[in-house]
Image (tube, coloured by chain):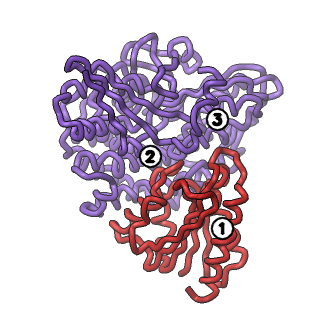
Amino acid sequence: MILVIGIGNADRGDDAAGLVAARHIRDAAPPGVTVTELDGDQLTLLDAWDGAADVYVVDAVCSGAEPGTVCRFDGSAPLGARFKHRGTHIFSLADVVELGRALHRLPVRLRGYGIEGAAFELGAPLSLEAEAAARTVAEQILHELWAGG
Amino acid sequence: MTHGSRLRVPALTRVEGEGGLEIVVDDGQVTEARLDIYEPPRFFEALLRGRQYTEPPDITARICGICPVAYQMSACAAIEDACGVTVPADIAALRRLLYCGEWMESHALHVYLLHAPDFLGYESGIHLARDHPDAVARGLRLKKAGNHLMEVVGGRSVHPVNVRIGGFYRAPSVSALRALLPELEQARQDAAETVAWVATFTFPDFSRDYEFVSLRHPDEYPITAGRVVSTGGLDIPPAGYDRHFTEFQVPHSTALHSVLDGKTYLTGPLARYSLNSGRLPAEVAAVARAAGLGPTCANPFRSIVVRAVELLYACDEALRLIRGYQPPDPPAVDVLPRAATGYGCTEAPRGLLYHRYAITADGTVTDAKIVPPTSQNQRAIEADLRAFAAARIGLPPERLTEECERAVRSYDPCISCAAHFLDLRVVGS
């Protein structure tokens, strides 16, 4: 099974970038691809990708880079500092991937993208930079999905 | 704290979970231990003014991703109090069931991934999982069971959407809840094993002379309702809270401190257990006794055992409530606004959570006060740290930092995960 997971909080500005990317992908994904959204508790990723062999994750990041910057990761190695921020989540994406690795609960293939956010305040809208980056990430993932991975 | 100064606090949305500690040593003696934390609820109080009386449960749920139900339940209790409404027993039971899911989620997370690594010598839950995958898997199973319970009753596991003033938008079906029974039976077994597991840990000898504060209910271990009581003899309804509890600002923290009639106090699992252990079901009480707990517990490090006992209780209570469940019909009662002030207290996983709302006859919220447990516990944490550090001031700084971090995590503050990266400064002279 191929699974795309968008992570974020729809009410916190650019934290929603992963959700927005997932919605773009859902609209144009090839048959057989499942798209889901996660809000908040990233530990539930371990259950969300349970049974999926090929997984894409898209999340907002806050590393100090220019807003809208996109970084790609491969889950076969630790994700690094850019994905370490906790924000409103108890565990960072990097933490959950390492926990999954320790428990042998990682998908066979795990790839993902981080979208640098500009603002994460409660009630803030998605910034233009994050919105453009979400579309770029969606197009890249869709390209890979239609090309067969 | 004034409204204006509250706005000068750096962006709270990105600092949730950060904390610092400063210990001041003067002439070889610890003279100060300051916990510096940032608390979003002050920001939310201003947000709530001018909103409709139906909105606080959904708005305040956003204060915390770990205990949104606590905020929803205290908000409902306070607003229904203002409106003179008491929900029927079946709606109250469904609220209690939802709350059990949150206790399971929160306590499982803290016991396994935040606190247990301290006792077993691991840097984090991830490191613990590498050597003890079965134990961590058990913790995640418990948390998942809590998640599922919250999804079925609350609509989703984080920030539930099914709660409203007067009850619920929709009552879950009997079959949807009964489908959870096998998972909850497993969770109960896992919780019992959790109690036995944490009881084997080695705890520092550090019992304190606390004034404990929690709810007390005549018939049940307190979660959703009760009077506010203390080991010092306080026994008041939630409406009396402001006459006894005073919040005030300290220079080193953006979170208000709180005192009970001028005294430092502690809320949370140790307080709940010590004031209510006699209300635990016999089987749960027997498990607690087997784990070495007496009727009270005043050692913050042993709070992991109490939390595990409460985890077992939450599973037990969820099973009981589901077996007796009949969907409330209607799922909510009418709650009409009136010009009044209402008060609500419930037991968040971390302790007493107080809400107060003033509303007008047309239902506009004109004033809101929210006092979360972590804010209330700051003074007790600082007092404990002074005593704890004083006995260890000769330790090398790195070791002292580790020991103080452990001490802070015992209280399961909302800054728990950041407390793993506590910035300790020792100022000496």
Q: In the drawing, does residue B379 fall left or right of residue B369?
A: left
The residue at the point 42 percent across, 27 percent down is: B377
Between the residue at mark 2 and the residue at mark 3, the CA separation in whole angstroms equals 27 Å
Q: Mark 1 or mark 3: which is in front?
A: 1
Q: Quadrant of the C terminus of chain B?
A: top left
Q: In the drawing, does residue A99 fall left or right of residue A29?
A: left
Number of the label disc, if any, that sits on residue B106: 2
Q: Is residue B165 or residue B210 the one in the foreground?
A: B210
Shade representing chain B: purple
Query: Which amino acid, by three-letter code, is at mark 1?
Result: Ala
Disc 3 target residue: B88
Q: Is residue A100 visible?
A: yes
- Judge whether B418 appears above or below B360 on screen: below
The chain carrying label 3 is B
Measured as percent of width and height from the top left, residue B206 is found at: 22, 28
Shade representing chain A: red
Q: Is residue B385 visible?
A: no
